[in-house]
Image (spheres, rainbow, N blue to C red):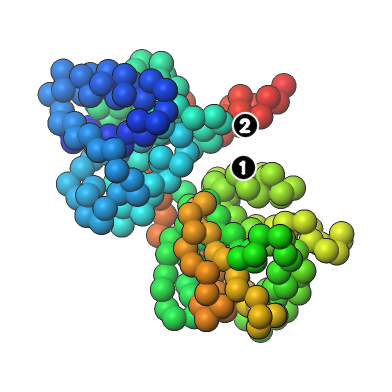
Amino acid sequence: MLPLNNIAFVINRSKPSAQAVAETLVNLTEKQGAKAVVIEDYPLKEGFLEGFDACCAIGGDGTLLGAVSESVQRQVPIFGVNQGKLGFLATFSPEEAQEQWADFLEGHYMIDHRVLLNCKTATGVEKQVLNDVVIKNSVITRLIDLTVSSENDLITECSCDGLIFSTPTGSTAYNLSAGGPIIHPSARVFTLTPICPHTLTHRSVILSDDMPIAVNTLDAEVVPAVKLDGRYHFEDKNEFPLTITISEKTLPLLQSQSYSHFRILRNKLGWG
């Protein structure tokens, strides 16, 4: 892989020790003659990553998610140093990052191209999503009635607390908490997982990459709320139906050459 000569650092200062970790990595970067630029604001502004070779997010998975849109648009690899809790995306510990930093700068890394979902509203607004699209009632104490179909083929009408459409990367996030399956990140599929469905036989469904999904509301009085990667996108029934597909774009995620997804699962989930 190409050497890294120009690196952006995104820092979540609310995380303990994030500042100290950033200073260490910036010093290591500059000692090897590379350029380092530090920013604390995320989501990143449009165009910020133009000209960078990589982006390092120091915080948790949420910090890294704040750089996803720019990384996808500019195809600048991103990676995370975990200062949060689980860290399925921010997979490097501060110690691992420091130990491997010189190798990264010299080009000894690999790029994992992660599947994204494309979420398009009825008014034509499109967003790329790394983890999940979550649809709920804007009144959080009430159920929502939704219909899900693919090319006019009805999949389900579901009365539930909400629906989660998850990428393989996001399968270990909200999808997993709601009882959905863990999907290997190399699979070009996505999942439909109901949240506390009123009918107990409703279960997660794994959908293929050639299935465009349409989601609509069944109750004209209900105002649905839609979150993309954990952030509110809108509360407006006029934006329905939503169309959800696997995006043609991918996220370039920088990984160690020794990266193992199953090692991450064993460590984070306490598997034997």
Disc 1 marks a residue whose amino acid type is Thr
Q: Nearer the viewer, mark 1 or mark 2?
A: 1
**Residue 267, image x and y in percent?**
61, 24
Q: Earlier in the sequence, mark 1 or mark 2?
A: 1
- Residue at image x 70%, y 80%? 218
Crowd tier of the residue under label 1, counting other residues whose Cα lies within 10 Å: few below 14, some 14–19, many 20 or above: many
Q: Is residue 2 left or right of residue 79?
A: left
Q: Secondary structure at mark 2?
A: helix
Q: CA distance from mark 1 to mark 2?
A: 9 Å
- Residue at image x 70%, y 26%? 271
- Tell me, yes or no, if residue 143 can be seen here: yes
| Residue ID for mark 1 | 172
Extreme residue toward the right, this view: 200
Crowd tier of the residue under label 2, counting other residues whose Cα lies within 10 Å: few below 14, some 14–19, many 20 or above: some
Q: Secondary structure at mark 1?
A: helix
Quadrant in the picture for the C terminus: top right
Disc 2 marks a residue whose amino acid type is Leu
- Residue at image x 77%, y 69%? 159
| Residue ID for mark 2 | 265
112 vs 13, nearest the viewer:
13
Snapshot quadrant of residue 25: top left
**Residue 108, image x and y in percent?**
32, 27
Query: Mark 1 and 2 residues: CB-CB less than 8 Å, in contact?
Result: yes
Above or below, 82 against 241 in this view is above
Snapshot quadrant of residue 28: top left
- Tell me, yes or no, if residue 155 can be seen here: no
**Residue 192, image x and y in percent?**
67, 60
